[in-house]
Amino acid sequence: MTAFVIRRLLQSAVVVFVMSLIVFFGVNVVGDPVDMLINPEADQEDIERAIRALGLDRPIGEQYFYFVKGALSGDFGRSFIFGEPALKLVLQRMPATFELAFTALVMAIVFGIPLGLYAGLRPNALSSKTIMAGSILGFSLPTFWVGLMLIMVFAVMLGWLPATGRGEVATILGISSSLFTLDGLSHILLPAFNLALLKISLVIRLTRAGTREAIYQDYIKFARAKGLSENRIIFVHLLKNILIPVVTVLGLEFGNLVAFSVVTETIFAWPGMGKLLIDSIQQLDRPVIVAYLIVIVLLFVLINLIVDVLYSVLDPRVRIGESQT
Amino acid sequence: MTTTANQDPEIAPTELAGQFQSPFRRFVSDFFESWVATVAFALFLVIVFGALFAPLISPQDPYDLAQVDVMESRLPPGSMSYQGYTFLLGTDGAGRDLFSAILYGLRISLSVGVVSGIIAMIIGSSVGLTAAYCGGRVEALIMRIVDLQLSFPAILIALMLLAVFGKGVDKIMIALVTVQWAYYARTVRSTAIVERQKEYVEAARCLGLSHKRVLFHHILPNCLAPLIVVVTVQTAHAIALEATLSFLGVGLPQTEPSLGLLISNGFEYMLSGRYWISFFPGIALLLTIVSINLVGDQLRDVLNPRLQR
Amino acid sequence: MTDQVPTLEVVDLATHFFTKAGIVKAVDGVSFSVGAGEVVGLVGESGSGKTVTGFSIVGLVDPPGKVVSGSIRLKGEDLVHANAERLREIRGNQVAMIFQDPMMTLNPVLRIDTQMIEAVRAHRELNRAAAREIARNALGQVGIPSPNERLKAYPHQLSGGMRQRVAIAIAFVNKPDLIIADEPTTALDVTIQAQIIHEAQTLCRQTGTALIWITHDLAVVAGLADRICVMYAGRIVEAGPSDDVLDRPMHPYTAGLIGSVPTHNKRGERLRQIPGMTPSLLNLPPGCAFRSRCANAQSNCQQTPDETTPFDGRRLRCHHPMTAIERQP
Ligand SMILES: Nc1ncnc2c1ncn2[C@@H]1O[C@H](COP(=O)(O)OP(=O)(O)OP(=O)(O)O)[C@@H](O)[C@H]1O
Ligand code: SF4
Ligand SMILES: [Mg+2]
């Protein structure tokens, strides 16, 4: 187990190294670093000074060294717009994004698993076919357009839910979240559902496919032959087998949700990292862009790592396989 | 597709009859067996037709300033224009006929999607073939890169590139190609590896056939079926991704009003209840993506030898 | 025993699969009975409908399969028309089944104790500790060393033989009246096979449990079963006391099966295989299903042979049974 974790850590380090190279060369070779990192409104003298301060007159290898050094100490420069350290800005917006992604994840599980299970258990029922047609649609609908339609229907036409912003935030046990207030909940419902839609469809499909496959397995039949109740067969024998792959996939999808929240946050004016990124791209606030990219790469690597470890804890087959090697 | 678990592969009577048909005829008849796929295919043809002949079909050239009247902006669907034709789907914020704008927008969306798809296919297939053909370290390295890229969501990579390059037609093409090539590389490689190990390729090599011949006459034709499936799925993805990026304002410039931009431009009127400016371009986008996806689904079922009954 | 109600009585059972390609008559008019403490061997080639017969009894035929006619009585109680809840009560409690493949029968993500305790508690109001104790004893009975540790294991940590023993322990755990063992030893190697057969036999004799032992291997049932039913293409073609059937097979198919058992041949002589293959049960034409492979076949074999009773206790479906001379090698 420890050997496994260490090996995965090393792999992750390589990925982060490669990505830092790509971001660095993206900024320094493809794009003009002066454009990228220095406020375009600065005058010539400022630019010269900044070039020297940033070490842009040094050889490229040395520059990379300083880039990594700065990045390691959390220094990606200051935002041109806000004048604050870029990393701090990104991290400040992180809780809002995580809250959104987390809520979407919960929605994906809460809606996706029961619907998928139902569709898998009664594949020929009309209701199951409707669920599956819905999930195909959920895959094809562009997220941003669904967001608009949600606003149109629930905010404009029906007036039930607010269309923009995060709402009131409360702090419980040191965690500030809008999930703790009614106002916050009403604000998060639409964007979270928007973000979740694709994942709900995914979970429905995975759960249905898993159910269809498991239902014909001998161990399910054997469970029946033991005289177990249908509930126990479905909710213990079947579900536990299906849940492992579904949870793994969903874990991996958390990073995906964070990435996709760029779209949802923009539509619902949700003050998260994603909206910050789009604003920064449009305002050419490059230090923030670089900081966001590095943060998200780290996040992805971390998620992959956690999911791998969790998976090995969850699935006894994998767990044992690893401990024996 | 129905699941037939636990069932012995009994010989189906149609199997024998099918053997005497040409593979292509069989493919066509299998494809149109499903009415959903047939409708989707017909819809797709209509969309492509509409896009190709947009100047002939649309009542107005929405980007000819002489034909557009700002006084007619934001009219609801069904309103009459001064020129005497009906704004079937209403007008947008600048007074353009939305139906015409959608047809013109489809042209841009489709061409961006298709062209980037083709370029990605050429690049990705070549890389995948190279990997399968060289084997060893080259293959391992290439597949590592493919895996690494596929572990990040497409939208993130696209945003990354656009953040570095800025917006523009060429930039978004680069982004879309970068996002897609890995899928092609993976598909082609996995098929080519299977083919590589088959005896007839060995035999062809022993016969002293040139690499080129082996490649074009033996390996590539077998990669065709999976490639076709990936092309449809990826084209739908590319169209959706372009629309998303353009909607976010980091994709195409306003001079290339794709469906995504039309939707984006209608967004500001949404809250005042003028839904149609965003709604109808969205429906057009949705129909395009859904029809391509459904066609792709059916292609996968028909072309997948494991599923053939 | 004859005037008592048998533990299981199957009369004219027919189970068909209604597939897209047509009707598969997997079981088509099967009758037999098993008394308390009796071991009946159900023998036949792959695809002859043995497993489907077993599943029909416990009401676990998968769609598109259905029991279309006939009756199944467990100590007089009708199982064909029993409702779902009653069937559930019976399964695992009065009738237990052991499956063909020990690798697949235990749920891979649940521990052995979970899977055994739930089997006990599905039928008896016991707390977990008491159920666990019963499970532990059951494991001990089937010859599993250090049952306490095994209980905490996951299935993949056990060997195939161990897993099959667990499955057998589960089958016996509620002291059922009838156990249907579906080729429980085919996937195992010969020594373990012999041990398991011995254990199952002992347990049955001790508890008075009736046992249906399904197999394609005549050698296995020879030393185990009191009576043998030979199945071919969904029908029982010959039945009778084991020794009797093995010594004096009357159906050409039974004779062929016996000829293909290794021990029956002289050394150096080639094994005799029955030529040809089991016919597809899909849209099976009328007539004796064995006729394409039968040396005795004549034109009247185009008609389905009725069941006859040549001797007391023997049943047969054949127009031209083997004579004593033909049986000589
Ligand atoms: N779900 C099903 N759908 C269609 N046909 C089926 C199904 N299950 C079983 N059959 C058919 O029923 C027939 C009998 O199958 P069964 O499993 O009872 O054979 P068996 O005697 O147990 O063979 P084996 O020794 O291989 O286990 C087979 O010909 C099979 O094709
Ligand atoms: S009925 Fe005819 S074909 Fe069938 S086993 Fe008897 S002799 Fe052979
Ligand atoms: Mg069987």
Image (spheres, coloured by chain):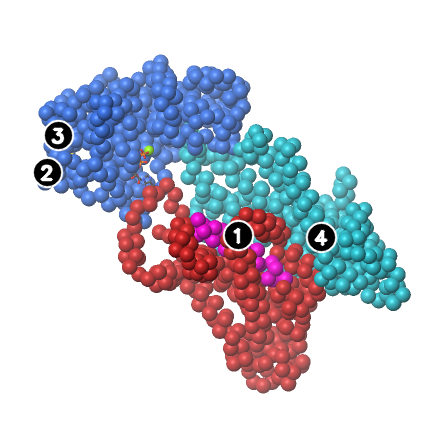
Q: Residue furthest top?
A: C206
Residue at numbered disc 4: A21
The percent position of residue B212, horizontal first and vertical second, equals 46, 61
Badge 2 crowding class, 10 Å Cα cut-off, few under 14, some 14 to 19, many 20 or more, is few
Q: Which chain carries label 1?
A: B
Secondary element at image label 3: loop
Quadrant position of residue A84:
bottom right
Secondary element at image label 2: loop
Residue at numbered disc 3: C321
Q: Which chain is red?
A: B
Image: magenta residue range: B175-197
Question: Are tags 1 and 3 found on a single chain?
Answer: no
Determine the CA span between mark 1 and mark 3: 67 Å
Q: Kindly tell me whether residue C117 is visible in this rendering.
A: yes
Label 4 is placed on what type of residue? Leu
* Disc 3: residue Cβ within 8 A of ligand 2's nearest atom: yes
The percent position of residue C122, horizontal first and vertical second, equals 46, 26
Question: Are tags 3 and 4 found on a single chain?
Answer: no
Of residues C152 and B218, which is closer to you in this image?
A: B218
Residue B183 drawn in magenta: yes
- Residue found at x 55% / y 50%: B139
Label 2 is placed on what type of residue? Gln
Secondary element at image label 4: helix
Residue at numbered disc 2: C298
Residue at numbered disc 1: B134
Question: Are tags 4 and 2 found on a single chain?
Answer: no
